[in-house]
Image: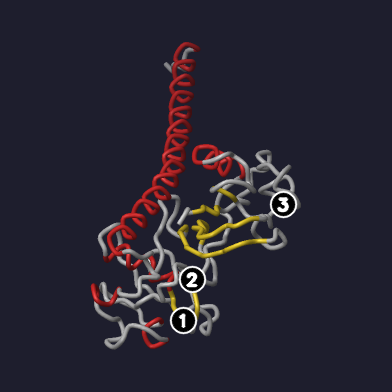
């Protein structure tokens, strides 16, 4: 004699399935919220580490002109020049910056953008180990290459998402940056085929969420911004005064520009 499921039994099964599905979706939301909070923590930790470094060594990391006195020279010589700047470190051995107060990239003067992370790690102020030098670009071997997890830190948002530091200075508002003095900024985005992490990683709503937590929620103002190059991320590319995050667009259209204040 065969017995089927009663309506009560089927109802119980459906309720259980609904609870499981709701729990999974809720769990995913909680995980994503924690990842977005980690961006805030990472940014604040890097700022704190840099200010601590400056207090101790009277210089910005990467720009530190006496770095080799503390951690030896990667080139085994004077710690300056291309023979040092292109030397990948497997330990704390490093190169000197030029001490001009700017963390900048130059094939002639310095590779301070990459040494910045190495100096912070050598001083014990951030976790990880960083090579301090460009990595060969597998797509274009003649060009410099930033590699997340190798010469720049990896974010908890993803294995190919990282931080690059760059002195952008003053922008007239015609390039990728909004008008104004951007100073030193962290560029947080996905792995690119050059030195800068510029691949969009966030939908506009999540970008707005981070900006609101740390700043003013405006894409073209304050210390947290995005670029003025992606129409899917913001509502107006021409004016910071009227532009807002395009929260109706759910595509990965934004990456972060985070002013450091130093």
Task: Tell me residue 49's x, y (percent).
Answer: 34, 55
Whichever of labels 1 and 3 marks the residue nearer the N terminus, that label is 1
> What separation in Å lies between label 1 and label 3 (alpha carbons)?
36 Å
* Residue that appears at 71% across and 44% down: 241
* Residue that appears at 47% across and 19% down: 15
Picture quadrant where residue 54 is located: bottom left
Task: Tell me residue 194's x, y (percent).
Answer: 54, 72
Mark number for residue 104? 2
> What separation in Å lies between label 2 and label 3 (alpha carbons)?
29 Å
The answer to the question of whether label 1 and label 2 lie on touching residues, with beta carbons closer than 8 A, is yes
The answer to the question of whether label 1 and label 3 lie on touching residues, with beta carbons closer than 8 A, is no
Q: Is residue 18 visible?
A: yes
48 sits to left or right of 246: left
Whichever of labels 1 and 2 marks the residue nearer the N terminus, that label is 2
Task: Tell me residue 104's x, y (percent).
Answer: 48, 71
User: Between residues 182 and 116, which one lies in front from this camera angle?
Assistant: 182
User: How did the renderer colour the structure?
Assistant: secondary structure
Mark number for residue 109? 1
Q: Tell me the mark number nearer the camera, choosing from 2 and 3.
A: 2
Helix, strand or loop under label 3: loop
The image shows residue 96, relative to residue 223, as above or below, that is below
Q: Which residue is mark 3?
A: 231
Whichever of labels 2 and 3 marks the residue nearer the N terminus, that label is 2
Task: Tell me residue 82's x, y (percent).
Answer: 42, 86
Helix, strand or loop under label 2: loop
Mark 1 neighbour density, 10 Å: few (under 14) some (14–19) many (20 or more):
some
């Amino acid at each position: 004699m065969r017995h089927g499921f009663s309506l009560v039994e089927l109802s119980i099964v459906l309720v259980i399935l609904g609870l499981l599905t709701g729990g999974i979706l809720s769990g995913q939301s909680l995980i994503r919220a924690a990842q977005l909070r980690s961006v805030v923590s990472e940014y604040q930790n890097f700022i704190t580490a840099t200010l601590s470094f400056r207090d101790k060594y009277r210089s910005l990391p990467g720009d530190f002109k006496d770095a080799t006195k503390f951690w030896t020279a990667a080139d085994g010589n004077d710690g300056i020049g291309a023979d040092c700047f292109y030397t990948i470190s497997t330990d704390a051995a490093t190169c000197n910056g030029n001490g001009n107060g700017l963390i900048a990239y130059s094939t002639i003067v310095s590779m301070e953008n990459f040494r910045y992370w190495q100096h912070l790690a050598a001083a014990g102020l951030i976790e990880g180990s960083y090579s301090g030098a460009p990595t060969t670009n597998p797509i274009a071997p003649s060009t410099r290459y930033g590699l997340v997890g190798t010469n720049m830190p990896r974010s908890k948002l993803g294995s190919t998402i990282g931080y690059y530091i760059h002195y952008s200075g003053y922008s007239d508002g015609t390039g990728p940056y909004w008008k104004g003095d951007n100073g030193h900024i962290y560029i947080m985005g996905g792995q690119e085929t050059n030195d800068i992490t510029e691949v969009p990683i966030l939908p506009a709503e999540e970008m707005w969420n981070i900006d609101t937590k740390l700043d003013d929620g405006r894409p073209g103002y304050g210390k947290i911004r995005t670029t003025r190059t992606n129409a899917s991320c913001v509502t107006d590319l021409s004016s910071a005064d009227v532009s807002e995050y395009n929260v109706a667009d759910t595509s990965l259209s934004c990456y972060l520009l985070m002013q450091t204040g130093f």
